[in-house]
Amino acid sequence: MKQLITRSALIASAFLFSQTAQAANNELVYAFEYTGQITYTDGSLSGAAIGTPLQGQLLATCTSIAICSQQWSLSEGIGEYEFDAGYISASFAGHTVSGGTPSLLLVDNVNGQGQDVLDFGSESPFTIDGIPSSNQLFLGLLLTSQSGQTDAVDGLQLPSQINVSEFDSRLNRTFGVLANRSPQFTPIIEFQLLSINVTSVPEPSSYMLMGVGLIGVAGLARRRQQARH
């Protein structure tokens, strides 16, 4: 009976390990589309005016679970996601601005301060209308809840739904910005966020599977070592 249990444990651990290895080679994708309306322009991009509609996309990918697990940080109330590929873009008034490899920050009532935050952005090299920009640019989206509103962000997993209306636009703390970062942070356009539609989100089981598999294998190894003594 003991041998049968040991053999079953080995088979189960081998299965978990094979599933883990398979999952680790899968690309994880997080993506959404968004809309907005320009509220400020410095006049440097022709046709951009207050009230001009805007739309954009975010695509963030990790080539493997192993890479993600090293780059993602989930601490109490804060989730930081660093991806190794992707882009964030904005299209308006005949222009398209695109920057690479976005990062994501989630804050869920951190330290009980009664506020939620979603922060998406890219500081990677940008193109404007398909031409590489020589300027150091930033394109980002910031969503901050009203004080005391802690239902806008629920947990630290990548959100499968983002309801812009649950965040605080009245105090201009929910907005997007395209800006020069050097020599100082100077907005080129700012825009009100109107909607975000999440189109792809990793299944929680896909990046939890690695931890489960390794825990199972480690536990079995520990038991076998104890049995020898």
Image: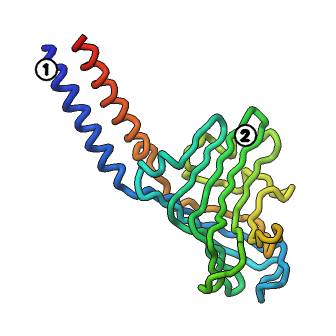
Which residue does the image show at 79% across and 53% down from the upper left?
168
Q: Where is residue 41? Give x, y as percent.
A: 83, 77
Residue type at mark 2: give it: Thr
Determine the residue located farthest toward the front in the rendered image. 229
Which quadrant of the figure has residue 78?
A: top right
Kindly identify which residue carries mark 1: 4
- Residue 211 left/right relative to 3: right
Asked whether, in this view, residue 31 is left or right of residue 6, the answer is right
Query: In what element is the residue under mark 2?
Result: loop
Residue to which mark 2 is pinned: 150
The kind of residue on which mark 1 rests is Leu
Residue nearest the observer in this picture, 54 or 110: 110
Judge whether 48 appears above or below 218 on screen.
below
- The Cα–Cα distance between marks 2 and 1, rounded to whole angstroms, is 50 Å
What x and y, as percent, mark residue 52? 77, 79
The reply to whether the C-beta atoms of the residues labelled 2 and 1 are less than 8 Å apart is no
Which image quadrant: the N terminus?
A: top left
**Total of numbered circles in the picture?**
2
Mark 2 vs mark 1: in front:
1
Quadrant for residue 37, please give it.
Answer: bottom right
- The numbered dot on residue 74 is none
Q: Residues within 10 Å of mark 1 (few under 14, many from 20)?
A: few
Q: Quadrant of residue 28?
A: bottom left
In terms of sequence position, does the residue under pointer 2 or pointer 1 come before the other? Answer: 1
Q: Residue at x 34, y 36 (%)?
A: 213
Note whether residue 57 is visible: no
Dot 2 surroundings within 10 Å: few (below 14), some, or many (20 or more)?
A: many
Rendered image coloring scheme: rainbow
**Residue 82 x %, y %:** 56, 54
Q: Residue at x 62, y 82 (%)?
A: 132
The quadrant of the image that shows the C terminus is top left
